[in-house]
Image: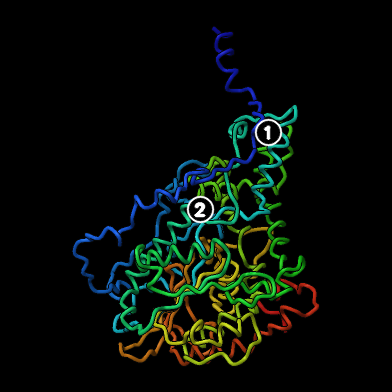
Amino acid sequence: MLAGVLLFALPFCSAESASSFAGSTVVASYPPPGATNTAIDSYFPDASQIGYAGSTPTGAEPEAIATAIPFSKVESAFPLSRPNSKDGADIAFNVMRHWGNLSPMYSVESFGLPDASPVIPEGCGLNAVHLLMRHGARYPTSDSGPSAFAAAIYSAASKNGFSVTGDLEFLATWTYKLGAEILTPFGREALFSHGVAFRYRYGELLNAFTDLPVFRTTSQDRMVDSALNFAAGFFEVGTYQTDYHQEIIIEADNFNNTLAPYYVCPNSNTDDIGHFGSTQADAWANVYLQDARIRLQSMIQGFNLTISDLVDMQQMCAYETVALGFSKFCDLFTEEEWEGYEYYAGFWYSNGPGNPTAAAQGLGYVQELVARLTQTPIAVWNSSTNSTLDSSKITFPLNQPIYVDATHDVAIASIITALNFTTLATTGPLPTDHIPPNRSYIASQIAPFASQLVAQVLSCPASGEPTHIRFILNDGVVPLTGIHGCTEDSNGLCALPSFISGMHERIGQINFAHDCFADYTMPNPDNLIDGRYPG
């Protein structure tokens, strides 16, 4: 009997030798080659050719942001499977909300105003809205860590001595199924759904348009697709292409673009300044992943797991989930290690208050925002603003009730820094040897996939003339007390003249030419709390 028990147990204890394709890249192509045949297109006329649409009267535009109580929150990431940590299923701990900028957008409870709601305060009226949004969930970038990790596994699996067991046994037959750069199906769906939600909340403002709206995005594929999916949700799939104008601004070196400002800020791309955040993150990774390295190394032979590999594996969890709906990498890490990754992925030292180029990169958008709020053309071109586009009333209208701009995570982090939302920086600078309790700067709350920064322009009491403004970041109302002239308010309101005056002051403080172009070394990070070079 004893021998029988041992024979029965051996398959469960032995290491799994890898297949020859472990770690290899798998790609698909749709439509299949040769499937497109224009010769048969005439058999499938579109709805306008068929006719017989039935009755099509429209209803009134919704304005749920003024009437819907309680506010509808984003609390799930359907249809993605919610992953567990190594600690097991815990309804109170959501792994997805610890992926930093790779997290799907979720509704933030509060940024320090627990009684405030995105719903318009009682007695106020909605006059205009400005939306700055991040693109939806995407595949990793072309030079990403996850793709390099897959290549390393593939190389190791092709040699003798590579084997895996325990939690890593799945690597024996695992293949890399991720593309690069473009939106995943979930990324497309999220932007479409955000467009629908935005129509429900702010659709009534369409009644104030006298011409078609101009929305802006950049030229990268995922940026264009994000903008179009949002528009299809906001307007209507059948008509959105003629319901508005989509402006696409070139995103490339030496092209001024406030939605991709890093291309005209050289210091933001240097190793010692622009990539200082990576240096700080690496220091923290060597702290929080030591136990994971020891634990997981015992399950893999013929491959030396580095701290960098473990970061790649955590990122693989996020990328596979938003691309494929599920990932076996997620439950390799404990809740504490996922909290460590959230801290690792923070923008503080890269595009937040702890980097001397952050405010300069966000300056151009702030100048555009002030121009829109005051309906005054930009007169000084000293930032990433595009003088050709922003000088035109066609490509940069100043009288729209709704503005929609699509951008990147790093740009949102920089713009928030330029706006001087100091409550987010309350607990900084951030150490690299531990996570401070109750920290105020959390990447997944600031710039997750499909992040939304909304500026509500209000009249209090309701009238045709705007009197106040407030900002809502991923459904959390942001205090504006860091802006000169804006006082404490339980609803996050600031008098519009005070806000505009405070922004003029802030614009004057930010030295784009110096912070982006001057020859300087990275200053002491303990002296950086507002995204500008000290002094």
**x and y percent of residue 217 in the render?**
52, 71
Position of 5 relative to 43 (above/below): above
Q: Quadrant of residue 16?
A: top right
Foreground: disc 2 or disc 1: 2
Residue drawn 74% across the image and 39% down it = 304
Q: Which residue is mark 1?
A: 300
Label 2 sits on what residue type? Thr
Q: Quadrant of residue 152?
A: top right
- Is 255 displayed left or right of 522 in the figure? left
Q: Is residue 527 visible?
A: yes
Disc 2/disc 1 C-alpha distance (Å): 31 Å
- Label 1: state its secondary structure: strand
**x and y percent of residue 409 in the render?**
57, 66
Position of 210 relative to 337 (above/below): below
* Nearer to the camera, 51 or 266: 51
* Nearer to the camera, 336 or 463: 463
Quadrant of the rendering where the C terminus is positioned: bottom right
**x and y percent of residue 249 in the render?**
57, 73
Label 1 sits on what residue type? Ile
- Is 393 displayed left or right of 157 in the figure? left
Q: Which residue is mark 2?
A: 184
Label 2 vs 1, first from the N-terminus? 2
